[in-house]
Amino acid sequence: MSKRIGLIGLGIMGSAISGNFLKSGYSVTGFDLDTARCDELADKGGTAAGSPAEVVQVSDIVITSLPSTAALDAVCTGEKGIITAGNADVIVMECSTFPIEDKQRNHNALAEAGVKMLDAPLSGTGAQAREKDLAVYLSGDEDAADVCAEIIEGFARAHYYVGPFGNGSKMKYVANHLVAIHNIAAAEAMVMGMKGGLDAQVIYDVISDSAGTSRMFEVRGPMMVANNYSDATMKISVWQKDMAVIGAFAKSVECPTPLFTTCSDIYVAGMAHGRENEDTAAVCAILGEAARLER
C-alpha cells in the first residue's frame, strides 16, 4: 500500500512537489495559510486541510517546505500544529533551508511527542521541482530515512543519506554556496559575451555544450537570453534568507568564503533595483546595467 503524503507549505516548491506526487498516484493532503494555494491543490486532485494538525492526522509522511523559522515553529508546536495531531507514527521531512539550531529545536519538541523529524533539504530550483529534477539530502534517524526513501521517486530524481540530523542542512549550504556563485558567473559571462557583440541565444547554445557550462547556466540561461525574470523559481527576496544562513554557517566554522562574499552584494543590488520579486537570474540585468549593455 502506498504511503499517504502530506504537504505543509504549498509555495513554489510545495506546489510542484504535490503535483508530482499526484501524477505518481499518491494520495496527497496539503495545507497553506494562502487559501488560493489550497484551492489549487484541490483542483489538481489533492485534499486541502484546515491546519497542519489535520494534514498529520491523515498522513504517513509529511513534507514541510516553509518560508521562515517562525512558520516552522508555528507548524510544529503552535496551535493546531504537528505536535497536537496525536499521530506518533508520522514521519516529518523538513525540507526548508534554515539554520540548523532552528530545525533542531523543533526536532526535539516533536521527539518528545514521539514524532520523528528528518532534516531533508532539497537541491534544485522551482523549475527543476516541476520536472522532478531534485536531489534530497536526508539526515537524522536512519530507519525513518529508509522509509522516506521509498516515496522520493514520486517527486525527486535522487536522494542521499548524509548522516546525523543537521548534516542535510550542512550539505544544502554547500550546494547553495555553489549555486550563488555559479548563477553570478553565468550572468557575468552572458553580459560579457553580449557586450562583445555576441547574440544571447548563440552564447547559451554554445556554452551549454562546452566545458564551461554549469547546471545554473543551463537552468537560468534561458531567462537571461529572454531578459525576462518574472516567472521566478527563486525570488531574490527569498534568496536573501538562504544567503544569510550560508554566511552565518561559514562564519560559525571559521571558513573564509571570498567568492561567496563578493557575489552576495550583487544580489543585494537586485533588491535595491526593485527586482526583489524576480528570479535570481535577474542578476544578469543588474550586471548588464553596470556594463551599460543595451538590449
Image (cartoon, rainbow, N blue to C red):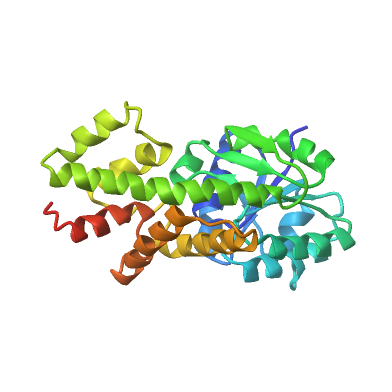
The image position of residue 14, as x and y in percent, is 56, 51
Q: Is residue 193 above or below residue 249?
A: above
Decide if residue 26 is on the left or right side of residue 275. right
| Residue 277 appearing in the image | no
**Which image quarter: residue 235?**
bottom left
The image position of residue 116, as x and y in percent, is 82, 52
Q: Nearer the viewer, residue 261 or 123?
A: 261
- At x 38%, y 48%, the residue is 183
The image position of residue 134, as x and y in percent, is 55, 39
- At x 27%, y 52%, the residue is 284
The image position of residue 280, as x and y in percent, is 38, 55
- At x 44%, y 51%, the residue is 180
| Residue 157 appearing in the image | yes
Q: Nearer the viewer, residue 253 or 41?
A: 253
Q: Nearer the viewer, residue 67 or 283?
A: 283
- At x 69%, y 70%, the residue is 74
**Which image quarter: residue 269?**
bottom left
Decide if residue 283 is on the left or right side of residue 71. left
Q: Is residue 135 above or below residue 240?
A: above
- Number of dots carrying numbers: 0
Q: Nearer the viewer, residue 43 or 172?
A: 172
Decide if residue 19 is on the left or right side of residue 286. right
Q: Is residue 208 above or below residue 13?
A: above
Q: Quadrant of the N terminus?
A: top right
